[in-house]
């Protein structure tokens, strides 16, 4: 059945086939049309027409699935997917130009050769998709000349192709991107998710004078550079490096940026682009209320950021410590500030966790004292070189020599404490604390590092005076800066780590008051191997 709707200004034509709309060309000005049958040969709307498609799919085997042009023209698809056929070349799932608007709730996919998921051009043109956008062998999104594209979903390009391309346009994606994010000058691209580059490709290419914001992690493979700065003399000779705001760049951080410039300009432009990478400084859930301030950050695109090698000073509430994953954090002498240096690649998430009332108890108990001075005699509690190089097998490590070393360290610690008369944490006798020798099972893999550290810190703070804390561990166990700080405050508490080897329990005993800070590695941790090599192990 063929149906023609005639109007004052040129017509709108639809070819109907049973329950399907085979082809729809709608060019009437100020006319509205509703389609509730599947469209198999695409929709073309222009001259201010408004088309609404309800709960059906739109496809085209030989052209654009949706084509919209002209100011006032609008195509809306409610709960329907948009696809182009494999026989297409350079066609688009959605093509919008000269001020048209397209709004789709559903996925958009181009299956043709070099096809676009979305192609949008010219000022006033907007395309909004709530769903995923992809291209089998072309670009996921290509926006130019002032167009705006917004996608709530994931975006991907074909193998070796860009996922997102913007030239003097705006692109917003709330989701992950697979493929290169490419700006061709004077654009704003925001990706609220991760970006993963294709093998052999950079994750970001930039012609300069633009802003790219990626709130997640950028990942490149092998030795590929994360960012490529292009400059074509006849197009952007005087372009400045783009402002790139990103949480983290994973991969080859020694080669973050490469250029297409000649050798005389290469190093200068590389350094300029590196200094224009602003890493987002995040705060872990539940920590923001315990962090008073972070000095050293700069506001960019609404985020607290810092460039590579910037030193941050974090101020926390009394009784809280700071960690930042594998990044080393140093506690300052004032007791409430911590410093860290932003590494190449960023990835800073600040976590503020309570040192489980250990400091606050000093005020609460009145007569209690907390020794926060963890300095010791130069010769006390220092691991021997032989112990530091010891093997990590618990059975072989339980030797007489290591037991002697462990005993020597313990005695040295006791003597040092006795000679210097270090104050020890003393609670009010009426307080009801944990047993003298509490125990618990802890594992950073099953509990997560934050939960693991918080559990240990809490138990250390609440052991009765002069008690011993026994922890059943795995070889994934470690002591972090926060745990070491808690033990230095509770310098009356000894620690016994119990690990099973071939069904036999072994203990690693750490005497009270031992200077554990000297054992912390660059990542702010003392790992299982270092603990074992330093203190030895014995059958429980």
Image (spheres, rainbow, N blue to C red):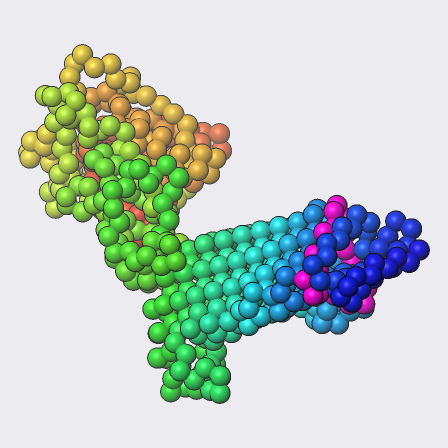
Residue 187 visible in the picture: yes
Q: In this view, does 277 lie to the left or right of 198?
A: left
Residue 500 on image: x %, y %:
44, 31
In the picture, measured across the screen, residue 8 lies left or right of residue 308, that is: right
Residue 198 in the magenta stretch? The answer is no
The quadrant where residue 87 appears: bottom right
Q: Is residue 218 above or below residue 131?
A: below
- The residue drawn where x is 68% and y is 53% is 76
What is the residue that sits farthest to the top in this orientation? 430
Where residue 447 sits, quadrant-wise, is: top left
- Work out whether 253 lies above or below 152: below
Q: Residue shown at 63%/61% (left/top)?
A: 72
Residue 468: x and y, percent? 27, 25
x and y, in percent, of residue 129 in the image: 62, 54
Give the magenta range.
44-64
**In the rendered structure, does residue 58 fall within the stretch colored magenta?**
yes
Q: Where, quadrant-wise, is the N terminus in this rendering? A: bottom right
- Which percent across, then down, holds residue 215? 45, 54
Decide if residue 463 is on the left or right side of residue 263.
left
At horizontal 43% and vertical 40% (from top left) the residue drawn is 476
Residue in the foreground of this view, choosing between 506 and 163: 163
- Closer to the camera in the image, 325 or 218: 218
Q: Which residue lies furthest to the right in this view?
A: 1
Tell me the quadrant of the picture where the C terminus can be found: top left
Residue at position x 12%, y 23% from top?
368
* Between 22 and 205, the one nearer to me in the picture: 22
- Is residue 176 in sight in this rendering? no
Decide: is 320 above or below 184: above
Q: Is residue 136 left or right of residue 450?
A: right
Q: How many marks?
A: 0
Compared with 145, 471 (above or below) is above
């Amino acid at each position: 059945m063929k149906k023609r709707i005639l109007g004052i200004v040129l017509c709108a034509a639809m070819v109907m086939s049973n329950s399907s709309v085979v082809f729809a060309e709608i060019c009437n000005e100020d006319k509205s049309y509703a389609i509730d049958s599947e469209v198999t040969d695409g929709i073309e709307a222009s001259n201010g027409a408004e088309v609404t498609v309800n709960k059906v799919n739109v496809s085209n085997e030989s052209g654009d699935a949706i084509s919209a042009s002209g100011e006032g023209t609008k195509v809306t698809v409610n709960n329907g997917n948009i696809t182009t056929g494999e026989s297409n070349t350079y066609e688009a799932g959605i093509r919008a130009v000269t001020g048209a608007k397209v709004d789709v709730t559903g996925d958009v996919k181009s299956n043709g050769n070099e096809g676009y998921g979305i192609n949008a051009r010219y000022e006033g043109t907007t395309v909004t998709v709530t769903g995923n956008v992809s291209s089998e062998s072309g670009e996921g999104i290509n926006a130019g000349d002032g167009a705006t594209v917004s996608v709530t979903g994931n975006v991907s390009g074909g193998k070796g192709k860009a996922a997102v391309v913007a030239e003097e346009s705006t692109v917003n994606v709330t989701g992950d991107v697979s493929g290169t994010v490419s700006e061709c000058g004077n654009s704003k691209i925001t990706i609220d998710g991760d970006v993963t580059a294709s093998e052999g490709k950079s994750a970001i290419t930039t012609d300069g004078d633009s802003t790219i914001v990626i709130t997640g992690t950028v990942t490149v493979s092998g030795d590929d550079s994360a960012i490529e700065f292009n400059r074509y003399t006849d197009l952007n000779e005087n372009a400045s490096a783009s402002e790139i705001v990103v949480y983290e760049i994973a991969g080859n951080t020694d080669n973050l940026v490469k250029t297409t410039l000649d050798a005389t300009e290469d190093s200068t432009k590389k350094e300029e682009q590196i200094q224009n990478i602003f890493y987002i400084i995040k705060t872990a859930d539940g920590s923001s209320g315990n962090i008073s301030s972070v000095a050293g950050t700069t506001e960019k695109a609404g985020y607290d950021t810092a460039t590579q090698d910037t030193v941050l000073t974090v101020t926390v509430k009394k009784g809280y410590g700071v960690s930042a994953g594998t990044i080393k954090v140093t506690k300052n002498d004032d007791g409430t500030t911590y410093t860290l240096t932003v590494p190449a690649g960023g990835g800073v998430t600040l976590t503020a966790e309570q040192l489980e009332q250990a400091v606050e108890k000093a005020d609460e108990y009145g007569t209690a004292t907390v020794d926060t001075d963890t300095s010791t005699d130069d010769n006390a509690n220092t691991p021997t070189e032989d112990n530091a190089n010891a093997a990590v097998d618990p059975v072989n490590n339980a030797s007489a020599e290591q037991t002697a070393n462990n005993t020597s360290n313990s005695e040295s610690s006791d003597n040092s404490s006795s000679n210097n008369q270090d104050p020890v944490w003393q609670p009010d006798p009426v307080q009801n604390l944990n047993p003298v020798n509490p125990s618990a099972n802890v594992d950073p893999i099953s509990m997560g590092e934050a939960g693991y550290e918080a559990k240990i810190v809490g138990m250390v703070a609440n052991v009765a005076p002069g008690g011993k804390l026994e922890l059943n561990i795995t070889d994934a166990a470690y002591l972090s800066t926060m745990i070491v700080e808690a033990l230095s405050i509770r310098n009356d508490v000894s620690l016994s780590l119990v690990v099973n080897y071939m069904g036999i329990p072994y203990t690693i005993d750490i005497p009270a008051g031992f200077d554990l800070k000297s054992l912390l590695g660059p990542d702010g941790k003392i790992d299982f191997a270092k603990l074992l090599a330093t203190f030895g192990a014995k059958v429980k």
